[in-house]
Image (cartoon, grey):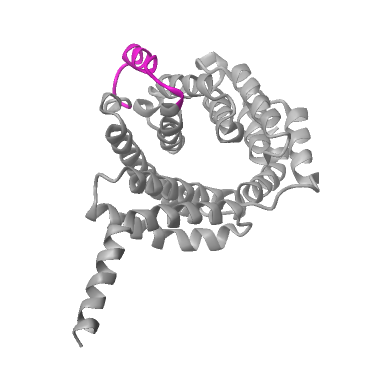
Amino acid sequence: MKIKRILPVIVFYIFISSCSLYIDSFTNNLNTAIKTSNDPQTIMQALPAYIVLLDGLIEGDADNEETLLASVNLMNAYSSLLGSQIDIIEDIPDYEILKIRNQQKILNQKALDRASKAICIYKEFYCRITVIKYSELYTLLNRMSTEDAIILYKLATAWVSWIQVNTDDWNAMAQLAQIKLLMEKIIEHDNEIDNGNAHVYLGVLNSIIPATLGGKPEVGKKHFEMAISISNNTNLMAKALYAEYYSRLIFDENLHNKLISEILSDKNVSPNLINTLAIEKAKALQRSAEDYF
């Protein structure tokens, strides 16, 4: 009888003491499952429960760097999936688009806040990285190591995602230079990080606004092409965003149609989540091309 009473206590103790290990394994497996899925709708319906689950874990251990970053990954993924609905669903009402944008803003702000906290826990001198001036950031990033680049990339992706849903806010847009600098410094340490996706982010960041207003679309073009090259032509989202941001910005219809055609005719595509979304985006771009050009 005593053994029966003691056993649950022992099991509970073992669970608590190894909880971090199980959480890390779980979140890594979850990230892999999300990336390899070709069913965006199911993933989008499932993610809120896991986001809330990690919220609960963070409430119990607010300074756990790994859990904070896992939460950032899930919120950014969910925000991206929400945004993809605007591409996938035809004739979506304006009020639904506004609702999606508002939810994305909430998610991306929370993700950026948690990424900033995680990087502060990682190294204290990075604590104010998202609020300091450009000159201060430039000096700070000279201290970056290759090991730092890996975690700073996670912060950078959260920062980019945040600015992508806040393009209507000039205070947010004023941070473009800092975000680009951070990404540029990261690829100086690891040019192929995340299978070249750092270049995709830089492609988008340099192509958000036209050259006449201070944008650098030709720099963006080089980054898009570098990302496609690093991925050995398998990164369909790089092509989709290349078409959406660069070719439409400069009104290059031939390049736009070429990129869309390559995406939709690729028979060797890996059926993962990003490529599935890229194909849906390409179809949407194809539908709207006649009106745009």
For the question of whether residue 31 can be seen, the reply is yes
Residue 102 appearing in the image: no
Pinpoint residue 234: horizontal percent, then vertical percent: 71, 39
Asked whether 253 falls inside the magenta stretch, the response is no
* Quadrant in which the C terminus appears: top right
Q: Give residue 13's position: percent from left, percent from top.
A: 25, 65
Question: Residue 86 at x, y = what percent?
Answer: 55, 49
Q: Residue at horizontal 43%, vertical 28%?
A: 147
Observer-nearest residue: 40 or 253? 40
Residue 84 falls left or right of residue 5: right
* Residue situated furthest bottom in the rendering: 1
Quadrant in which residue 15 is drawn: bottom left
- 82 or 289: nearer the viewer: 82
Residue 234 placement, left or right of 161: right
Q: Percent x, y for residue 69?
A: 38, 44
Residue at 55% across, 56% down? 33
Quadrant housing residue 11: bottom left
In the picture, the quarter occupied by the N terminus is: bottom left
How many numbered discs, if any?
0
Q: Which residues are magenta?
A: 130-146
Q: Nearer the viewer, residue 8 or 156?
A: 8
Q: Is residue 238 above or below residue 173?
A: below
